[in-house]
Amino acid sequence: MFSARRRLPAAAFVLAPGSALVLALVLALVLVASPARAADPAQGERLARRWCAECHVVAPDQTRARADAPSFAAISAGRRVPQIEAFLRQDHPQMPDMSLSRSEIADLIAWMQSLAPPLDPAKPPPQKDDVTPSRGG
């Protein structure tokens, strides 16, 4: 016996009425969305001078900082980017609560990296900061 039922193409079962429009809008948003912004070392320097310079040496021209706070050059030379990111995302009792955004963290790290040569994977990381800022007035 032959059935009088007509077979519909498989695509007819995939999209419900109106869902094609929703799918098209979502796809358009994904394609039009702006790409991630590159880290900006100059913006990182501005952030570092505003938030970090009271304790850390954040720039080569800085003459005052706390002796027990590592310089940005030493931080960058002794740690990899994921370590610095993780540190900056956590609360620390000795540091102000800055609530940095991801882009601000990326900018700060870009500035730190501009101050020190890249970490050599063959060398062990330094154990402490050997850079002590001068205490000029």
Image: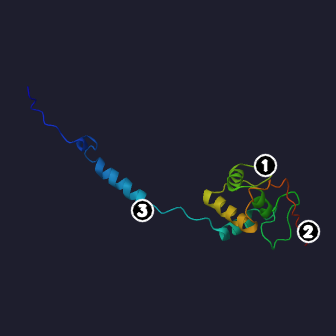
Q: Amino acid at mark 1?
A: Pro
Kindly identify which residue carries mark 3. Answer: 32
Are circles 3 and 2 on residues that touch, CB within 8 Å?
A: no
Give the Cα distance between marks 2 and 1: 25 Å
In this orientation, which residue lies closer to the viewer: 44 or 31? 31
- Name the residue beneath numbered marker 2: 135
Residue placed most toward the observer, 4 or 29: 4
Q: Which tag is nearer the camera, tag 3 or tag 2?
A: 3
Amino acid at dot 2: Arg
Horizontal and vertical percent position of residue 35? 50, 62
Label 1 sits on residue: 93
The mark that comes first in sequence, 3 or 1, is 3
SS for callout 2:
loop
Q: Give how far apart the Cα atoms at labels 3 and 1 are.
A: 42 Å
Residue ID at (29%, 50%): 20
Q: Residues within 10 Å of mark 3 (few under 14, many from 20)?
A: few
Q: Amino acid under label 3?
A: Val
Whether residue 70 sits left or right of residue 32 in the image: it is right
Q: Position of residue 82 (x, y in %)?
A: 67, 53
* SS under mark 3: helix
